């Protein structure tokens, strides 16, 4: 999820089996993460849309949605805690990823019951889905074991 032009946030929709189908890519080589977006104008709208879509993974662009550019360590830690509190209102979410192109990191990545929380510094955005596949695969493997 990221703030974009006009301070909008984007919510990614997941459509299994659709990515790559139009290009004739075999099912086993299709990317399970797609790039369809729904524009919302604030965090309340973002989390409402996420609840409606029953999203399982949320990816947040750290600056400026979670913490301001060149903000303090405290503002980053507080922003992550605030977002995770809001994520708790979306019962379907299992994985939360915070991504930034900067090298800064939180004091600690919070542990949350029922959620995998990851922080990706020096992410190399714009969004490339490959770095996130390991978190999605880990979640899927954990579900198979349960």
Image (cartoon, grey):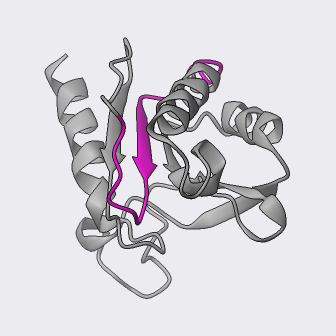
Residue at coordinates 44% horizontally, 46% vertically from top-left? Answer: 98
| Residue 54 can be seen in this image | yes
Q: Tell me which corner region of the image, top left, top right, bottom left or bottom right, holds residue 139.
A: top left
Residue at the farthest left position: 145
Q: Return the residue nearer the eye: 125 or 134.
A: 125
Seen from the viewer's position, the closer of residues 138 and 27 is 138
- Whether 8 is drawn above or below 92: the answer is below
Along the viewing direction, whichever of 124 and 102 lies nearer the viewer: 102
**Does residue 92 appear to the left or right of 133 in the view shown?**
right
Would you say the magenta stretch is mainly helix, strand or loop?
loop
Q: Is 89 contained in the magenta span?
A: yes
Residue 141, given in percent of the width and then of the height, sits at 17, 34
Q: Position of residue 119 (x, y in %)?
A: 34, 44
Where in the figure is residue 69, as x and y percent of width and height? 58, 58
State the residue at coordinates (59%, 19%): 85
Q: Which residues are magenta?
A: 88-106
Image height of 146 relative to 67, above or below: above
Which image quadrant for residue 20? bottom left
Quadrant for residue 23, please give it. Answer: bottom left
Q: Nearer the viewer, residue 124 or 55?
A: 124
Percent position (x, y) of residue 111? Answer: 32, 19
Within the magenta stretch, is there residue 44?
no
Left or right: where does residue 62 sit relative to residue 142? right
The residue located at (50%, 83%) in the rendering is 22
Count of marks, rendered view = 0
The correct choice, above or below, for 72 with respect to 1 in the image is above
Residue 87, compared with residue 72, is above or below; it is: above
Q: In what quadrant of the picture does the C terminus appear?
A: top left
């Amino acid at each position: 999820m990221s703030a974009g032009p006009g301070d909008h946030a984007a919510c990614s929709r997941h459509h299994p089996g659709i990515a790559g189908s139009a290009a004739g890519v075999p099912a086993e080589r299709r990317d399970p993460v797609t790039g369809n977006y729904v524009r919302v104008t604030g965090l309340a709208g973002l989390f409402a849309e996420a609840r409606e879509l029953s999203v399982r993974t949320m990816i947040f662009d750290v600056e400026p949605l979670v913490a301001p550019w060149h903000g303090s360590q405290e503002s980053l830690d507080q922003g992550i805690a605030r977002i995770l509190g809001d994520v708790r209102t979306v019962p379907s979410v299992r994985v939360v990823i915070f991504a930034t192109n900067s090298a800064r990191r939180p004091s600690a990545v919070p542990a949350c019951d029922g959620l995998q929380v990851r922080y990706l510094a020096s992410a190399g955005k714009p969004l490339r889905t490959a770095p996130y596949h390991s978190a999605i695969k880990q979640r899927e493997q954990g579900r198979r074991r349960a």
